[in-house]
Image (cartoon, rainbow, N blue to C red):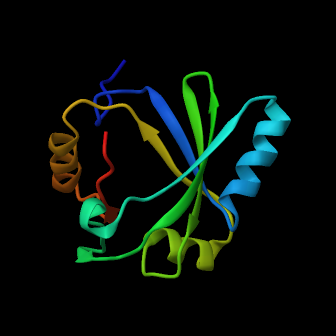
Amino acid sequence: MKESVIGTRIITQIGFLVRDAEATAKAYAEFFGVEYSTGATPAPEIAKMQYLGQPSNGSCKQGFVDLGDVQMEFIQPDDQPSLWRDDLEKNGEGLHHIAFWVKDMEGHIQKLKELDYPMLQRGGWPG
């Protein structure tokens, strides 16, 4: 079997763009019989968000449902420029990302740039 470009096949999170993160997380939690939690992106000076290579104050509310080793994340963007906002407006609610547990994220980001994968958005979260 070939090695993954990002060095792993371990999925840790599936993210969805939604109009109401808490209501969606609550509905999924009830369906699966589990708890849900909520959160939000950190303050702009912590997140240091970039969208299409430019600084952005885009933020979001988040809902989370843990299902074994995979977490469902529900993302409700604010009205500031972000990939979240643009995708929600253009495509409506739906799949946003599949996250993988990787070692050396910066190294893999560089490798993906060398393979011509564009960096659309990035930001930092504590932990």
Q: Is residue 108 left or right of residue 16?
A: left
Q: Is residue 27 above or below residue 59?
A: above
The residue nearer to you, when weighing 99 against 31, is 31
Question: To which quarter of the image does residue 41 belong?
Answer: bottom left
The residue nearer to you, when weighing 108 against 68, is 68
Q: Quadrant of the N terminus?
A: top left
The residue nearer to you, when weighing 90 against 16, is 16
Percent across and percent down for residue 45 are: 25, 67
Q: Is residue 11 left or right of residue 107?
A: right
Q: Is residue 60 left or right of residue 35?
A: left
Identity of the residue drawn at 56% across and 30% down: 70
Identity of the residue drawn at 30% across and 59% down: 123
Q: Is residue 114 above or below residue 103?
A: below
Question: To which quarter of the image does residue 116 belong?
Answer: bottom left
Identity of the residue drawn at 74% across and 53% down: 24
Percent across and percent down for residue 94 are: 66, 59
